[in-house]
Image (tube, rainbow, N blue to C red):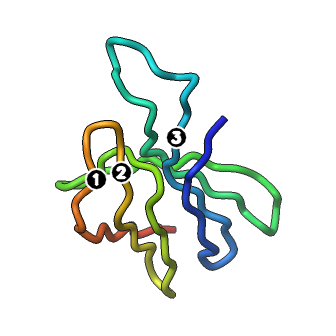
Amino acid sequence: PRFKHTAAIFNNYFCVFGGRNDKMYREDMQTVSLNDLHLLDLRTNNWVSVAIFGELLPQSRWGCSLVASNEKLLLFGGMNLEKICSSSIYEINIGK
């Protein structure tokens, strides 16, 4: 389960990023926020989980915004249990 996630349509995909899952809180993790990306292929109706990698990865967060352009997704804002996330804009390029 998740809520306060963000979503956008990108090409033929419905993209879902992050959110909050209060059922996953454990003392060792001390978080309920997610930083995962999932794509629903609107042509085949199949979900794919996407590994995000790079030099600077977005923190787990909820209440953020995801916007799609022709070539990439832009992620910004949100918060987690520790703080309001930085105002950095993350570019997520979806390759073939």
Residue 38 is left or right of residue 78, and the answer is right
Q: CA distance from mark 3 to mark 2?
A: 10 Å
What residue is shown at x 39% (from left), y 67% (from top)? 75
Mark carried by residue 79: 2
Which of the two labelled residues, at mark 1 and mark 2, occupies the earlier sequence position?
2
Residue 62 picture location, percent across and down: 46, 50
Q: CA distance from mark 1 to mark 3?
A: 14 Å
The residue carrying mark 3 is 20
Which residue occupies the extreme left position in the image? Answer: 55
Mark carried by residue 84: 1
Residue 83 picture location, percent across and down: 25, 46
| Amino acid bearing label 2 | Met
Which of the two labelled residues, at mark 1 and mark 3, occupies the earlier sequence position?
3
What residue is shown at x 42% (from left), y 14% (from top)? 26
Which of the two labelled residues, at mark 3 and mark 2, occupies the earlier sequence position?
3
Q: Residues within 10 Å of mark 1 (few under 14, many from 20)?
A: some
| Amino acid bearing label 3 | Arg
- Examine the rendered structure and indicate whether residue 39 appears above or below residue 1: below
